[in-house]
Image (cartoon, grey):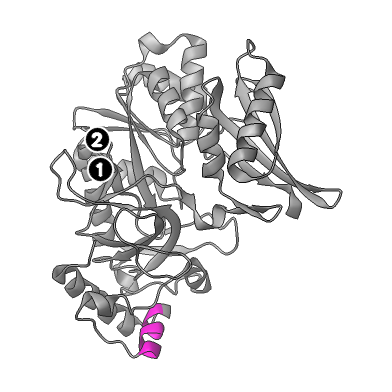
């Protein structure tokens, strides 16, 4: 997707605002001698921005609009260092709600729906993002927030919730609880809007069949508004994203050059109209591709493919580069295992060891299954892992995101 003239004009407004505010990016532009751009080639000369730049700007160094125009801040979790603080103007908050309401509409959700929101509120963008979008749409919001599964299920029944908003991990946990308690006939859910973590086709199928609902992938990140910047439609041919608010490129994470549409690479996002903390060429480290051509739904908004993982998800084991998505793909070839798995990497007796834990029902020969999985992993990746098979439900479930890769080498 090449940048359009309209998008170039909007980028130039962002360049002016960033330069005037003297933010980290304004300084980068000054160093590069760039005051404006005219062409797509000029755009590709603009410097990238990284999460480390945003951390260095803590607490309010990203603020580009005057302070009296800032109405809210949100923040990343800060689990790997200083949190990133993102300031929002009233227009930013409204733009985000408009984008999110559009997501709901693309999922076929209307103001007659009752939307149960389970992601967290507070500094995190999820809960309030789901809520603002639903209110902009005009639907009834049931703002539960995270946890308290007992209360979630009670409200789901009493309020007749028709839409569940959650992480895939929590949707799985709820579906298992509903099945266990025999509540399926009392639940009126029709759709699930799922975000915040990558999930496998097998997990999607498990949740969809267990709850009898249609599932929609929502995309977003705290640095770029939050969830709601893209969603798949009923045809499920990729996630439409809102190119009137964002310009998305896919780059080769090594050469940093744009790759052709249809080719996998790293998502890089430029905000076109954001006021509080605009970002230009922000490297998300999420891996995906632009899907060429038109969607059967007729929407002119371009599409991103499934998020395949992150550039920093890569594990180096015995000199081999391994992505969790590769293991996931292998496990999908074994219909007898559930969608849940866990990878543990440790360093024992001078060498790296990978253990893969998978779940299955009690009627399968655990040793035979472990052997078959280990053989398949060896044929694809080049070394043999230790595979441990456990009964369904024994691997941890989460009300937030499930940690599926645990690297004990650095503990």
Foreground pick, 237 / 284: 237
- Residue drawn 22% across the image and 52% down it: 302
Whether residues under marks 2 and 1 lie with C-beta atoms below 8 angstroms apart, the answer is yes
Q: Which mark is residue 103?
A: 1
- Tell me where residue 391 sits by quadrant: top right
Instruction: Tell me the SS state at disc 2.
Output: loop
Q: CA distance from mark 2 to mark 1?
A: 6 Å
Q: Looking at the picture, how far across and down is residue 8, in whole percent?
A: 20, 73
175 on left or right of 368: left
- Quadrant holding the N terminus: bottom left
Check disc 1 and report its element: helix, strand or loop. Answer: helix
Q: Is residue 66 left or right of residue 153?
A: left
The residue at 46%/69% (across/down) is 50
Label 2 Cα neighbours within 10 Å, binned few <14 / some 14-19 / many ≥20: many
Q: Specify whether residue 28 is painted magenta.
A: yes
- Vertical placement of 153 versus 29: above or below? above
Q: Height in image: 386 above or below 177?
A: below
Q: Residues within 10 Å of mark 1 (few under 14, many from 20)?
A: many
Chief SS of the magenta region: helix
Which residue is at 19% across, 51% downward? 301
**Residue 142 appears in view:** yes
Which residue reaches farthest right? Answer: 349
Tell me what residue is drawn at x 67 percent, y 15 percent. Answer: 365
Q: In this figure, which residue is indicated by the disc labeled 2?
A: 107
Q: Indicate the position of residue 394 as horizontal and vertical percent values.
A: 65, 23
Closer-to-camera residue (64/353): 353
Image height check: is 19 above or below 94?
below
Residue 100 in the image, given as x and y percentages of width and height: 27, 46
Per the rendered image, the range of residues in magenta is 25-32
């Amino acid at each position: 997707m090449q940048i359009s003239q309209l998008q170039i004009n909007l980028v130039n407004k962002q360049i002016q605002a960033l330069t005037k505010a003297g933010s980290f990016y304004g300084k980068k532009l000054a160093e590069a001698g760039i005051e404006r751009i005219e062409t797509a080639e000029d755009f590709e000369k603009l410097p990238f921005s990284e999460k480390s730049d945003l951390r260095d700007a803590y607490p309010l160094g990203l603020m580009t609009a005057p302070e009296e125009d800032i109405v809210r801040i949100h923040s990343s979790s800060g689990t790997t260092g200083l949190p990133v603080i993102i300031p929002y103007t009233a227009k930013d908050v409204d733009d985000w709600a408009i984008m999110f309401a559009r997501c709901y509409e693309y999922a076929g959700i209307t103001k007659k729906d009752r939307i149960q929101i389970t992601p967290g509120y507070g500094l995190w963008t999820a809960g309030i993002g789901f809520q603002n979008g639903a209110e902009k749409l005009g639907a009834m919001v049931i703002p539960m927030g995270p946890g308290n599964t007992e209360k979630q299920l009670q409200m789901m029944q009493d309020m007749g919730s028709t839409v569940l908003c959650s992480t895939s991990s929590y949707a799985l946990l709820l579906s298992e609880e509903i099945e266990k308690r025999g509540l399926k006939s009392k639940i009126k859910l029709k759709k699930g809007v799922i975000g915040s973590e990558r999930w496998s086709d097998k997990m999607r199928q498990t949740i969809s069949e267990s709850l009898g609902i249609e599932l929609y992938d929502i995309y977003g990140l705290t640095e770029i508004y939050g969830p709601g910047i893209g969603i798949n439609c009923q045809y499920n041919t990729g996630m439409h994203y809102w190119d009137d608010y964002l310009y998305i490129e896919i780059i080769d994470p090594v050469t940093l050059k744009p790759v052709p549409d249809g080719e996998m690479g790293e998502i890089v996002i430029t905000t076109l109209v954001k006021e509080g903390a605009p970002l230009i060429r922000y490297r998300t480290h999420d891996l995906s591709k632009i899907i060429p051509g038109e969607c059967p739904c007729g929407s002119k908004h371009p599409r991103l493919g499934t998020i395949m993982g992150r550039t920093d998800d890569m594990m180096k084991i015995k000199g081999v580069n391994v992505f969790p998505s590769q293991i996931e793909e292998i496990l999908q070839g074994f219909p007898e295992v559930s969608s849940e798995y866990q990878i543990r990497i440790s360093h024992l007796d001078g060498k790296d060891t990978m253990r893969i834990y998978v779940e299955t029902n009690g009627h399968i020969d655990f040793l035979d299954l472990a052997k078959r999985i280990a053989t398949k992993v060896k044929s694809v990746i080049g070394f043999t892992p230790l595979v441990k098979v456990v009964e369904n439900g024994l691997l941890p479930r989460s009300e937030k995101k499930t940690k599926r890769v645990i690297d004990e080498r650095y503990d």
